[in-house]
Amino acid sequence: MATRITRRLEALKAEDRAALVTFTMAGDPNYQASLDTLKGLPGAGADIIELGMPFTDPMADGPSIQKAALRALKGQHTQQKTLEMVREFRREDQDTPIVLMGYYNPIYRYGVERFLKDASEAGIDGLIVVDLPPEHDGELCLPAARAGIDFIRLATPTTDDKRLPRVLENTSGFIYYVSVAGVTGAAAPTPESVERSITRIRAHTELPIAVGFGIRSAEQAASIGRFADAVVVGSALISCIEHADSVDAGTRAVHALVRELSEGVRHARKATA
Amino acid sequence: MSSATDTTKRFSQGPNADGFYGDFGGRFVAETLMPLILELEEAWEWSRTDEAFRRELEGYQRDYIGRATPLYYAERLTEHLGGAKIYFKREDLNHTGAHKINNCIGQILLARKMGKKRIIAETGAGMHGVATATVAARFGMECVIYMGATDIERQQPNVFRMKLLGAEVIPVESGTGTLKDAMNEALRDWVTNVDSTFYLIGTVAGPHPYPAMVRDFQSVIGRETREQMLEKEGRLPDTLMACIGGGSNAMGLFHPMLDDESVHMIGVEAAGHGIETGEHAASLNGGEPGVLHGNRTFLLQSVDGQITDAHSVSAGLDYPGIGPEHAWLHTQKRVEYVSITDSEAIEAFKLCCELEGIIPALESAHSLAHLRKIAPDLPSDHLIVLNMSGRGDKDMASVANWLEQHGDTDKLPNTTVEAAEPGRIDDMQPPHDVAKKTGETE
């Protein structure tokens, strides 16, 4: 059974363009604004939505996403509310894939089986859990697969050819290539070096490859979208919320940037063909 | 749930190949770090059996750290409490003033072996930061120490020491600015500088192999204690006691005797203002299993899995987790874990100064406080070893603040200090929230 993620990525491949994957934090700056932002993302051009599950100790995230998580938690956001947000979104949108991204402890505390059941019912398509390497596939990755939820793994510049098969083994949906060894929001590497890495990963897998970390502008999205199957933008969108004068302005700024990024991705292969 | 088999090494055999002690431990880290963690594990496995490495390590332990540390009979404290015979394992007499350097010297030798040029570390009370800066200076490596902003304020002398030793001390403002936040920031540095950098973790926590590796380097404490006690008393001790933040000094003392069934072991956590207040650092007695900083262990956390802040008068115990091997020993009931409040620790701190002429670290004062509770009821042939994990010089400001807060001002250095008004004690804030210069009053 093809999942929403696979269907969407196959459709875009047929259109010969990369997917735009957006990351925003559930509950940032509050539940309603975060839901409004979420609902407007597909219309603004997001093809796949990553929704962050806030955690107090996001070890792999830079300051922007750390602060977003703390804003959400300050507003009493919970795992339950993240799932509720997706249920509300699904009432209006049955097609856009949603991937939850975060750290293991809030899922572990919720209870893995209970979480997978609730996530599946809410209409969640995939999970990215930063601190669960393949060595711990038994914890969540394999149970998620049984529940019909894609477990999307990160590959990084330190993932060499020897390790890649292990990383890819139980990955489904797509593989997320973290283009720099560093935290989210770090400076982007050159498109040339990213392309070399993508070529290396393609030799090991048929899975679509998304590229993220350090992509902030339509130009960058276009340059990566030339060769990647999907382009992920997170910290730049979070910054729109952080620096907005009002909650509504934050939502509008996110949607405006997503429209620009979407244009970039849509024209990537045409402009340089 | 335990996979431990019933052999002669029933309790000391862990971890398994995946870094687990029963359900606890593991390698819960971002993919970027995994290759390095595996490389480190290889280096550690090599170091455990390599004869030349062992000789080199022992040389530095003897000539640089000053080992073996004495096993000291605390005669006046024994008389005062009127029960068990009390010994202190004097880790406070190590170079840099605490047990921390035992681990640092081991890890930096590994770092050198792995060709790393840059050392990073987190620190709470600053003792691990000082020990790390010390060995980095000794081996000519670049050193960056992450320290919570709150801790920097309450441990100024150690910040100065680290800087003198050539380390860069980076204040961490995120979270509550204490040890866990410093660890987050060190992990972020490591992810960013993974090729050049060795992360020198200071306690028996973090992803495998750190808990086992740090334990191995600290186990010199327990091995010496065992030998020294056999020499002095002709038998093993009856009870071992140690304070626990992450738990490295306790693990070092306990591990070589875990399979000696007659030896009772007590780990003392920090109860802060009292476990019932929710403001404490007692992960085993007041926490739940969860995953943080690369391992599954008992954590202070909300029902939604968010990590909550630890509170303790002692910066070295102010951590919302505990080493995974302790979590396992707790569920196996091999070690008894108790907790001591800030005020009990301060009282024991004063008693040790006055009776033994030893100013203990506030961390060690927690185990002293539990000792006061149990020693009087034990027979005079009951041998207790308390790990004097560090000296208290670094805690002068914290103790002075605490005494001032509690109107106990007769020993404070500045005579302008006035006794607190009655009633002020109850609405006192945690000492680190009101870190003021000694001698000032509001």
Image: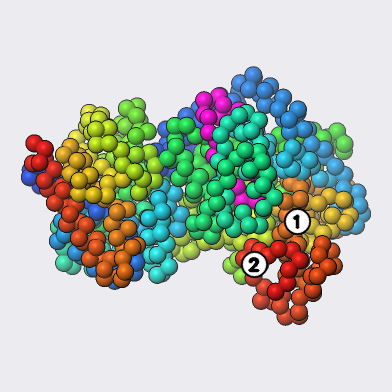
Question: Which of the image's four quarters has the C terminus of chain A?
Answer: top left
Q: Magenta part of the protein: which range?
A: B109-128
Numbered marks: total? 2
The answer to which of A43 and B251 lies nearer the viewer is: A43
Residue at 29% x, 60% y: name it. A240
Within-10-Å neighbours for mark 1: few <14, some 14–19, many 20+: some
Instruction: Tell me the quarter of the picture where residue B347 sits.
Output: bottom right
The answer to which of A115 and B101 lies nearer the viewer is: B101
Instruction: Tell me the quarter of the picture where residue A243 sits.
Output: bottom left
> What residue is pinned by disc 1?
B396
**Amino acid type of disc 2?**
Val
Q: Is residue A258 above or below residue B252?
A: below
Q: Position of residue A5 (x, y in %)?
A: 19, 49
Residue B434, labelled with which disc?
2
Residue B120 is covered by the magenta coloring = yes
Residue at 56% x, 26% y: name it. B112
Residue A248 visible in the current orientation: yes
Q: Position of residue A259 (x, y in %)?
A: 17, 57
Q: Position of residue B351 (x, y in %)?
A: 84, 58
Q: Is residue A116 above or below residue B201?
A: below
The CA distance from mark 2 to mark 1 is 15 Å
The answer to which of A130 and B136 lies nearer the viewer is: B136
Residue at 35% x, 58% y: name it. A53
The answer to which of A260 and A52 lies nearer the viewer is: A260
What's the chain of the residue with tag 2? B
For numbered disc 2, what is the local secondary structure?
helix
Q: Position of residue A256 (x, y in %)?
A: 20, 60
Q: Is residue A26 left or right of residue B291?
A: left
Q: Are marks 2 and 1 in contact (CB under 8 Å)?
A: no
Q: Is residue A209 left or right of residue B415?
A: left
